[in-house]
Image (spheres, coloured by chain):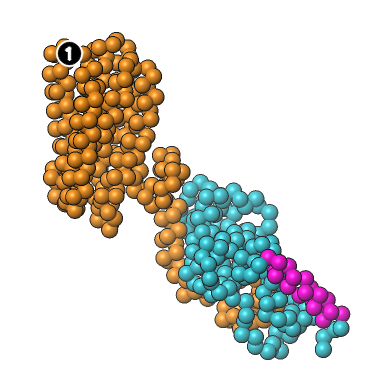
Amino acid sequence: MTGWHLDDDILRRYVERTDSLAEGASVEQHLLSCEPCRARVSTAAVGVIDFAAVWDRTRDAVEVPRPSVFERLLRAAGLPAHEARLVAVASAFRSAWLVGVITILAFAALAAGIGQARGMWLFLAVAPVVPCLVVASSYDPWLDPALEPELVTPYPALRLILLRTIAVLAIALPAVVLFGLVVPGRAPFAFLLPAVGFVAVVLAASTWVSPLRAAVVVSVVWLAVIWQLATRSGPPGEVLQAWAQAGFTVLAVASFVIFLVRRRRLRQVRPWR
Amino acid sequence: MDSRPGDETLLLAVAERDMGAFRTLYERHAGWLAIRLARRCNDRDLVADAIQDTFVAVWQKPQGFRGDGDIGAWLWGIAIRRLVSRLRTRSRVAAVFENTEAAPAAEDQVLLSVEYGDIGQALARLSPEMRAVIQAVVLDGLSAKEAAQLLDVPVSTVKTRLHRAKGRLRAVLAEGPS
């Protein structure tokens, strides 16, 4: 403490910037260590910037939790930060995604455990419908309260839903293919096309009904078909035939085209609640 | 003295995630920091952004202050670098260093002779460009690279101007006040 303080004239010149370089530098050096003079300058600072607004933004910035591992992964994959946030924001989405991957992996392991034919039927019954259930729950407004503000913001619903779908598939599929080394036969790879086909069907159907309802209907139909095939005790290889795979490809492409044509209907998501 | 908590106490509380202490710290320091930043940069939005960045940085790393020296100096060190970094991401912003150079009044001369002796007058005789470099490098303690970003000139220019400014100052001080 020097006992020296800014007098009112110097303070005024400093705030109004009518001082010389040397005087300004002298004032600034003093301010670094003088609490009372800092307070006086701060009082004169009203209106330099909107301090209340800057405080609000600062508080918002520090209260936002650090991006999750998942979100940082999406950003590392090249997605802009705000889109990574949108894709990852819903906790319902993350948990649905986690449950989906674990379910597929569990059934893959189970199928490997209980042996050739029955194990493959089990895997084929469950694995193809899991991705469409995960995708549906990732944007079903009933499961995902975060979706409402997202859809209120002027952000294309189509893009959001596609991004989430791709996020689901891009992370779930490699995990399953990895397990293909454990499961007998070509089943884990054969499940890819029906899985993609069902996701496309759910996307298309969600322009009419709630995505979750669509996914449940698709799942039930698929389980019934598998049940029929299995009780006729045909070999599971039948589903893997080229004609079946080609059918799933057509299904996927056709559904996706319908989805794109009717995408404006996605705006009507909220009345489903 | 009054019984308000000191800055170091507040900083410890901020480290404990105390939003009230953070707010007090903001109210105590945002003002003078903003005024000082506004003397370096005409764009008020950019100054506001830099203030926000500064306090976000304080919240994230309050332990960055190691208790040596005054908190004011520590905060200013963060603030001026945040401003430089904001300037880097936005291309063309006029950094201001040219004060409307009023002739020093009599009280100024007294103050200057107390605080700086002849240096004040020597500085006043430098060109605005040279004064800007002196202010950024010598008074604000920025590196040549940071000063270059703040002033929007190449690093080599900063170094040349600094060299010339020092030479001018030396010459002016050697010949004495005229």
The cyan-coloured chain is labelled B
* Identity, as a three-letter code, of the amino acid under mark 1: Gly
Is residue B164 inside the magenta stretch? yes
Q: Which residue is more in the foreground, A203 or A141?
A: A203
Q: Secondary structure at mark 1?
A: loop
In percent of the image, x 53 and y 71: which residue is there?
B92
Q: Is residue B78 above or below residue A124?
A: below
What range of the chain is rendered magenta? Answer: B155-174
- Residue A93 percent location from the top left of the image: 30, 39
The orange-coloured chain is labelled A
Q: Which residue is more in the foreground, A175 or B19?
A: A175
Q: Residues within 10 Å of mark 1 (few under 14, many from 20)?
A: few
Is residue B163 inside the magenta stretch? yes
From where the camera sits, is residue A104 visible? yes
**What residue would you read off at disc 1?**
A234
Considering every residue shown, the one lying at the far right of the view is B174
Q: Is residue A21 left or right of residue A203?
A: right
Protein chain holding label 1: A
- Residue B55 percent location from the top left of the image: 52, 58
Considering every residue shown, the one lying at the far top of the view is A115
- Residue B35 percent location from the top left of the image: 55, 72
